[in-house]
Amino acid sequence: MSKTNKGLFRMVGLGMLTAIIVVLQVVTTYFPTKPFAITLALIPIVIGAALYGPKAGAYLGAVFSVVVIIMCVFGADAGGAMVWNANPILCIVVCMVKGTMAGFCAGLVYNLLAKKNNILGAAAAAIVSPIVNTGIFYIGMLLFFRPVLEAWVGQGSNLLYHIIFTLTGINFLVELGVNIVLVPVIVQIVKVVSKNRV
């Protein structure tokens, strides 16, 4: 494939992944998967990071973050609206950092491991992305929005226990499982299809 075609393929691929992220995040915000709200937008972020590198992953993560912020501003996400109302600037910072770093770190991990095994690289990237996204979110919440977090869990509750087992718990495990299953398969399919192109 020529350099021009590669650039065009990358641009179209990133455009499609951008649209998918926006749609997935809006749909899962307005129609959350019950009983847990799963962030399906991480799947195209990790796929883009694997296919196009850490910078593309960071870009796609930033797109995800912008959509999350918009959902917070308009109150579509009740918890996000609480965070936005508490401190809009810090809400923007936490959202942008968590999404951008989730995509960037997925791309770094994929690049490191895919040289040995493409599927292992994709699976590891699929594991790292939700860990970074969720980890930075809860660190930001503990550092900057502790009163909001306490209001979520209720007074007198053990905050750390509630974060690990209730807020993160099953939701995070399902999100992680979906990423681990889908991302390596999709990345492998796209790699095979792109190799077979003229």
Image (tube, helix red, strand yellow):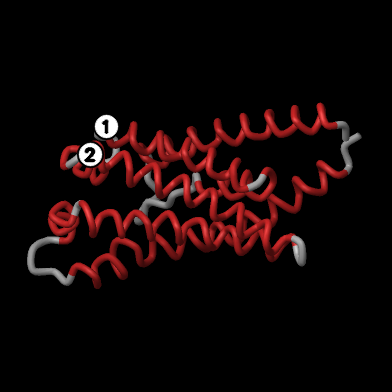
Residue sitting at the far left: 155
Q: Horizontal placement of 163 versus 178: left or right? A: left
Q: Residues within 10 Å of mark 2 (few under 14, many from 20)?
A: many
Give the x, y percent position of residue 39. Answer: 44, 49
Q: Are marks 1 and 2 in contact (CB under 8 Å)?
A: yes
Using the image as rendered, state which of residue 131 and residue 169 is in the foreground: 131
Answer above or below: position of 151 versus 16.
Answer: below
Residue occupying image coordinates x 33% and y 42% = 93
Q: Which mark is residue 84?
A: 2
Q: Residues within 10 Å of mark 1 (few under 14, many from 20)?
A: some
Amino acid under label 2? Trp
Helix, strand or loop at mark 1: helix
Answer above or below: position of 158 versus 118.
Answer: below
Give the x, y percent position of residue 101. Answer: 47, 50
Q: Horizontal placement of 138 versus 39: left or right? A: left
Give the x, y percent position of residue 173. Answer: 44, 65
Answer above or below: position of 51 versus 135.
Answer: above
What is the distance, in whole Å, between disc 1 and disc 2 at their CAs? Answer: 6 Å
Residue occupying image coordinates x 17% and y 61% = 153
Amino acid under label 1? Val
Answer above or below: position of 43 versus 3.
Answer: below
**Residue beneath label 1, please?**
73
Q: Horizontal placement of 175 versus 71: left or right? A: right
Q: Which mark is residue 89?
A: none
Residue occupying image coordinates x 34% and y 63% = 168
Quadrant where the image shows the N terminus: top right
* Residue 110, quarter of the rendered image: bottom right
Residue occupying image coordinates x 30% and y 70% = 165
Give the x, y percent position of residue 107. Answer: 61, 52
